[in-house]
Image (cartoon, rainbow, N blue to C red):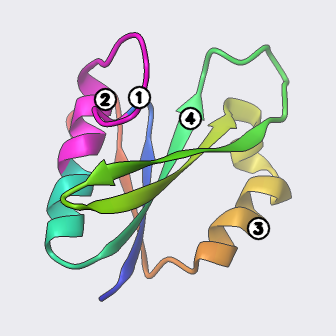
Amino acid sequence: MSRVALFAMGLPPAAGGCCHMGPGLRCGHFAAALTADGHEVLIVRCDNSAPARALRVRDLPGVPVAGREVGVIEASEPAFESELLRSRIRAFGPDALVGATVYAA
């Protein structure tokens, strides 16, 4: 079993939220396939609705994916260049990084 950090723009379908769009659905599909194949997945979601220059990283409740709970970290766009987020990702210890973006992945 490997560990995969999945970077996404939207909320995965199993996460609570008022709307789920393409990027979140794509993230959910990636997470489901990886989890079903036995990989441990961490979703790192870019919160582009945060105030400009806000440095925010927070854990969201885990989401059920393919019968297992998947961790979710939400980070503001500026946090993606910060040690704060990098240290959280290193703590997970991913073997691979996968991007599920707005564009065709």
Whether 2 is drawn above or below 74: the answer is below
- Magenta residue span: 12-29
Label 2 or label 3, whichever comes before in sequence order: 2
Tell me the amino acid under the disc marked 4. Answer: Cys
Q: Quadrant of the C terminus?
A: top left
| Disc 2 to disc 1, C-alpha distance | 5 Å
Callout 1 touching callout 3 (CB < 8 Å):
no
Callout 2 touching callout 1 (CB < 8 Å):
yes
| Disc 2 to disc 3, C-alpha distance | 25 Å
Tell me the amino acid under the disc marked 1. Answer: Gly
Whether 105 is drawn above or below 24: the answer is below
Label 2 or label 1, whichever comes before in sequence order: 1
Label 1 or label 3, whichever comes before in sequence order: 1
> Element type at marker 3?
helix
Q: Quadrant of the N terminus?
A: bottom left
Residue 41 visible here? yes
**Residue labelled with disc 1:** 10
**Residue labelled with disc 3:** 87
Across and down, in percent, residue 60 comes to 59, 42
Q: Residue at x 69, y 45 (%)?
A: 80
Across and down, in percent, residue 17 comes to 43, 19
Residue 103 visible here? no
**Residue labelled with disc 2:** 23
**Residue labelled with disc 4:** 46
Q: Residue at x 44, y 32 (%)?
A: 9
Callout 4 touching callout 2 (CB < 8 Å):
no
